[in-house]
Each structure stands twice: as C-alpha cells, then as structure tokens.
Amino acid sequence: MLYSEGFAHAKALAVKLVAIFSLSKQLLSPQQHYDWGLRALKTVLRVGGQLVAAEKKTRGGAALDEAEEAMLVIKALRVNTLSKLTHGDTAAFNALVGDVFPDAVPQDVAYDELEAALKEVMAHQGSRHATPHLTPHIPVSIHR
C-alpha cells in the first residue's frame, strides 16, 4: 500500500511501521480505545500518502529521498496516534518512534493557513493572548 500511496522507499518504511505498531501494542498500556491493527495502519498510510503527494506537488513532482519519506511517515503516524494516547504512553510512544527512526527529528503537520485565520479572528475580537493557546486547539486529523 505504501507504493500505491506514492512512497518510493516502501519496503524499508513498511518494516519500521510494522515494528512501531507491534511494539506499541506490546509496550504501551492496554487501553480499550487503542487500535494497533490494520485499520489504524491503513489510516496512517493514507495520511502519509497525502503528505507525500503534497510535498511532491510543492517540489514540482521531484522525488523524495528515504529520509524525507520517513519524516512524512512519522508526521502521519503522530497525527493519527498522539491524540489517542494517554499522557504516560505519549512519552513512551515518542521514544519508540525515536528508536525505530533514530536519525529523524519528529515534526507535526503545520496548519499555517488555519492558524493565520484563527489569529486574525482572535485579533479582530480583541483577544490578546491568542498565540500561546492556539496550537493545541488545531485539529490533529486529516481526512481524504
């Protein structure tokens, strides 16, 4: 499925993603709402595919190297997983991602246009303390 979503380095990324899902199921606390199955994996892959397509579009169709694709997979993984984890499991999950992708620096998806629009509305309404409290309220899921 990684190939069909536009990833050129699918084999290496697939091994790492499966490792993260398997280890998360084993090492994180057993919560009823955690889903480490194929449905959750498919969601991560779809979001990753959207991120790859968007990145390629900004580059005029130029190919991404393995490290760049890994960063996009990590973004997709974080977008779809972090909001569901307990506080204690969040740190463990981030450490796990760091172990599986040792050279990657995790980044979240940026919602620049949304953030700018929210700041504009808050400024128009006279809210002085908008900026520090803005980012946690931006949605953390992307739908196709």
Image (tube, rainbow, N blue to C red):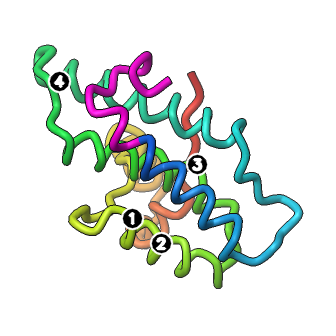
Q: CA distance from mark 4 to mark 1?
A: 28 Å
Q: CA distance from mark 3 to mark 1?
A: 17 Å
Q: Furthest-bottom residue in view? A: 88
Who is closer to the viewer here, 43 or 55? 43
Residue bearing mark 3: 80
Could you tell me the amino acid type at mark 2?
Answer: Leu
Residue 32's disc number:
none
Could you tell me the amino acid type at mark 3?
Answer: Asn
Q: Which residues are magenta?
A: 1-13
Residue bearing mark 4: 58
Q: CA distance from mark 1 to mark 2?
A: 6 Å
Q: Earlier in the sequence, mark 4 or mark 3?
A: 4
Residue 96's disc number:
2
Could you tell me the amino acid type at mark 1?
Answer: Val
Q: Name the front one of labels 4 and 1.
A: 1
Q: Main secondary structure of the magenta part?
A: loop
Q: Residues within 10 Å of mark 2 (few under 14, many from 20)?
A: some
* Contact between labelled residues 1 and 4, with CB atoms less than 8 Å apart: no
Residue at disc 2, secondary structure: helix
Residue at disc 4, secondary structure: helix
Residue bearing mark 1: 100
Q: CA distance from mark 4 to mark 3?
A: 23 Å
Could you tell me the amino acid type at mark 4?
Answer: Thr
Who is closer to the viewer here, 95 or 113? 95
- Name which residue lies at 72% across and 36% down: 39
Q: Earlier in the sequence, mark 4 or mark 2?
A: 4
**Which quadrant is home to the C terminus?**
top right
